[in-house]
Structure formats: structure tokens, C-alpha cells
Amino acid sequence: MIGTRLMKVADYVTGTSVADIGSDHAYLPIYLVEQQRIERAVAGEVVEGPFQAAVRNVRSEGLADKIQVRLGSGLEVIDSGEVDCITICGMGGPLISDILLTGRAKLASRPRLILQSNIHSEAVRQALQTLGYKIIAEDILKEKKHIYEIIVAEEGVMSLTEAEMKFGPLLLQEQSETFNEKWQKEYRHLTAILETIKELPAQHKKKEEIERQLQLYQEVIHFAD
Ligand code: SAM
């Protein structure tokens, strides 16, 4: 059974076909097909071990005719126009961004993108903006003490401010409890770093950047007491 995080990702899937990139055990495509949310899927995996695990799981569920497991990096495992949705989950924002930018030719048919980053989601938003995608939904959730963000995007134009890029345009509007928890923790972390470097002349540039970031936090986030 998949956890809350991937179940939330599944909720954003539309259409009849999905490519799950970095699929690991192929849990998400198996769930989507078993729940009859989609008709077919591609599970892409770049590492041999997880690829073999995905192949085994798909076979043991009797779904080999509906889920193709393919070994390869990023979007190279799919053809342009092959799927309605692409999911990339459980990775850092910079890696997701790199997969999208490197594979941009495979996005020509404008599949819906459902991206679940663990850290540095601003890199994902930046890539989406560059690629001509617009964020249509965002989610933030906590599972086993970890906080995850989900970004859903479709073809469109957006022009995000620095704060929207960092915190997420829709998450920023909503400012949920989990959102607050994440950024309050990060704010405390940055404040602690600032405290340790503030008297060190060699760290002057870093100190200025942290102060600028903290200022941004204070301007846009309504911290709970
Ligand atoms: N998507 C699953 C999830 O969210 O639970 C698995 C996440 S796991 C932490 C990340 C997976 O992405 C690993 O299995 C890793 O081998 C794979 N991966 C990393 N870079 C990749 C790339 N460029 N192309 C395809 N898979 C990649």
C-alpha cells in the first residue's frame, strides 16, 4: 500500500496514461492502474536495482501488459506525446528541474506535470516557468516527520516573484499549518547560522544574503505564535 504522500500525488493524475520517472518499486503506477485511475503507465528508473524491483512488482501484480518498466535516465524513457501525465516524486528540486530541462523535447505535447520535491522546490518552479508551464495546484503535507511539497503544472505562462518562487504561489496564499511549520523551522535555522557568523568578516557576503532571506520571510509569512 502506498503512503499519504504518493496517494496525494495520485489524486492529481488526470487522463489515461502516466509516466512515473524515478519510479523505484513502481508503487505509484501499480496503485494508479489497480485503482483504475489510469489505463497504462511507464515506470522509468535509472538504477538497475530499483528497476529490477519495479519489474518484479509489476509482474507479481499481473500488470505487465499495462505497466512498462523502462531503464533509463529522466524523460529519455518516453516518447513525446506518449502519456497524459508525468510524475516525478521523492527527489530534490534541483534533480527534478534537471530532468525536466534536459528532457524538454519530451514535453512538446504538454503533459500535466505532478512533481513532488523533498527540498529546494524553488528549482522546480523556476524550471516550470522557463518551460512555459503554469502552476495550477500546490500541496504541502507531513508524513513520518518529513514535510513534502507537491506541485502540479500545465501549459501556461507565469511570472513568479522571488517569494512565490521560494515558498510557492498557492502555498503562500494558503499558509497552512504545515507550511508554517516548515518555514518557521527554516527561519530558526537561518537565524542560528546568522548568529554564528555575524562577527566573522570573511562571512560578510553570506551574512548579507541570510539577512535578506530573513527579511523576505518576515515580509510574506504570517508566522504562528
Ligand atoms: N518515486 C518514488 C517515491 O516517490 O517514493 C521513489 C523515490 S526514490 C527516493 C528516487 C528514485 O529516483 C530512485 O529510485 C532513483 O534511482 C531514481 N532516479 C534518480 N535520478 C533519476 C533519473 N535521472 N532518472 C530516473 N530515475 C532516477
Image (cartoon, helix red, strand yellow):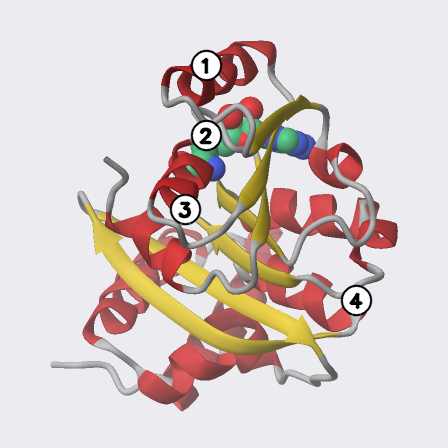
Mark 2 vs mark 3: in front: 3
Structural distance between the alpha carbons of marks 3 and 1: 18 Å
| Residue at x 53%, y 23% (from the top left corner) | 64
Determine which residue is flagged by label 1: 53
Nearer-N-terminus badge (2/3): 2
On the image, the x and y values in percent for residue 102 come to 82, 45
Determine which residue is flagged by label 4: 131
Determine which residue is flagged by label 2: 26
Determine which residue is flagged by label 3: 32
Query: Contact, CB < 8 Å: mark 2 with mark 3?
Result: no
| Residue at x 55%, y 32% (from the top left corner) | 67
Mark 3 residue crowding within 10 angstroms, few (<14) / some (14–19) / many (20+): many
Q: Examine the rendering and report whether any part of residue 31 can be seen.
A: yes
Nearer-N-terminus badge (4/1): 1
On the image, the x and y values in percent for residue 150 come to 44, 61
Structural distance between the alpha carbons of marks 2 and 4: 27 Å
Q: In this view, does 59 lie above or below 37?
A: above
The N terminus: image quadrant: top left
Q: For this view, does 88 lie left or right of residue 72? A: left
Nearer-N-terminus badge (1/2): 2
- Secondary element at tag 3: helix
- Secondary element at tag 1: helix
Structural distance between the alpha carbons of marks 4 and 1: 32 Å
Nearer-N-terminus badge (3/4): 3
Amino acid on which the number 4 mark rests in the picture: Leu
| Residue at x 44%, y 53% (from the top left corner) | 197
- In the image, farthest residue toward the left: 225
Of residue 69 and residue 187, the one placed in the foreground of this image is 69
